[in-house]
Image (spheres, grey):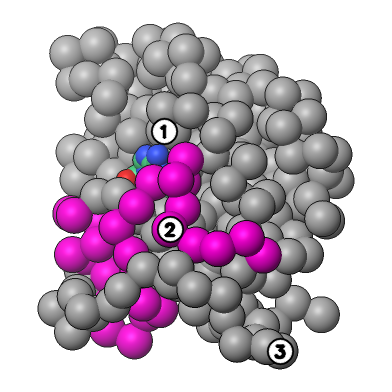
Amino acid sequence: MLLRQILVNACVMRANWGRREGVQPHTKRPAAGARLGILAGMAVYDTLGAYEPPRTVLAVEPSHVMLAQRPPRSAPAVRAVAERLPLCDDAADAVMALLTIHHWTDLAAGIAELRRVARRRVVVLTWDQQIFRERFWLVRDYLPRAAAFDDTRAVPIGRLVALLGGARQETVPVPHDCTDGFGAAYWRRPRAYLDPRVRAGISMLAQTGEDALAPGLAALADDLATGRWHERHAELLVLDAIDVGYRLLVADI
Ligand SMILES: C[S@@+](CC[C@H](N)C(=O)[O-])C[C@H]1O[C@@H](n2cnc3c(N)ncnc32)[C@H](O)[C@@H]1O
């Protein structure tokens, strides 16, 4: 049974980091019998949602901004990159990386680090770009340049499984009222994508750039105003969750 986890790469919006500034990296081996977990990539994108497994003992995140937004009562965090974790071998039961690997500068080194510090399990949330660009109406019908941008950084699932030394794959459907604001979170709330604050929290859109998105967003606004979007996507409006390619890879060491 996994008891505690450390998150590598943690970001939480609207947090109070102050009281955690004194946290030091865990460079020592945990006490005998200690059960730890590392979280690589903790998910929180909006004022409602926050996800940090309760047994998380350490979060790792390179961004000052993200660290500054961690809420009170979240696990201690350390500023570091996945490619060089300030942790000893076998430091944790489990290591988790959520929607972060596409940002790493050296994927192979980062995954090797997750495997080095995990005693029992490495969990990675990512997405299958081919499925995503075929099934997610936003990038397929309105924002092909965002899809093209993601083509340049999405990690093929097969490559990731190989780097993990084998992993089982689980489909992660996105609920219609998802409270994390990642890429497809608003699939049944199309108007949300017209909000610049929502787009700012989705790296695929923020990094593609507003100029490149403008024509597609204008078309979406028009389709929403005329009711065309709702006509075309009537079948979506009765669904509670959809699979647009998000995948959880679970590798037991
Ligand atoms: C899209 S956000 C996802 C954050 C979080 N995992 C989540 O699901 O909410 C990507 C995160 O990866 C972090 N990141 C970028 N490069 C990294 C690296 N080399 N190692 C660890 N984290 C990194 C960013 O600072 C950012 O917090």
Label 2 C-beta lies within 8 Å of the nearest ligand 1 atom: no
Give the residue type that dot 1 points to.
His
Choose mark 2 or mark 1, whichever is in front.
Answer: 2
Secondary structure beneath dot 1 equals helix
Give x and y (percent) for residue 40.
50, 55
Q: Which residue is mark 2?
A: 86
Give x and y (percent) for residue 201.
29, 44
Q: Which residue is mark 1?
A: 103
Give the residue type that dot 2 points to.
Pro
Q: State whether residue 181 appears in this view.
A: no
Count residues near mark 2 (Cα–Cα under 10 Å), then give few for <14, some for 14-19, many for 20+.
some
Drawn side of residue 33 relative to residue 54, left or right: right
Query: Where 141 sits versus 28, above or below?
Result: above
Which residue is at the front of the view, 126 or 108? 108
Query: Where 46 sits versus 163, above or below?
Result: below
Give the dominant element type of the magenta stretch: helix, strand or loop.
loop
Label 3 C-beta lies within 8 Å of the nearest ligand 1 atom: no
Q: Quadrant of the N terminus?
A: bottom right
Range covered by the magenta-colored residues: 64-90
Label 1 C-beta lies within 8 Å of the nearest ligand 1 atom: yes
Which residue is at the front of the view, 194 or 232? 194
Secondary structure beneath dot 2 equals loop
Secondary structure beneath dot 3 equals loop
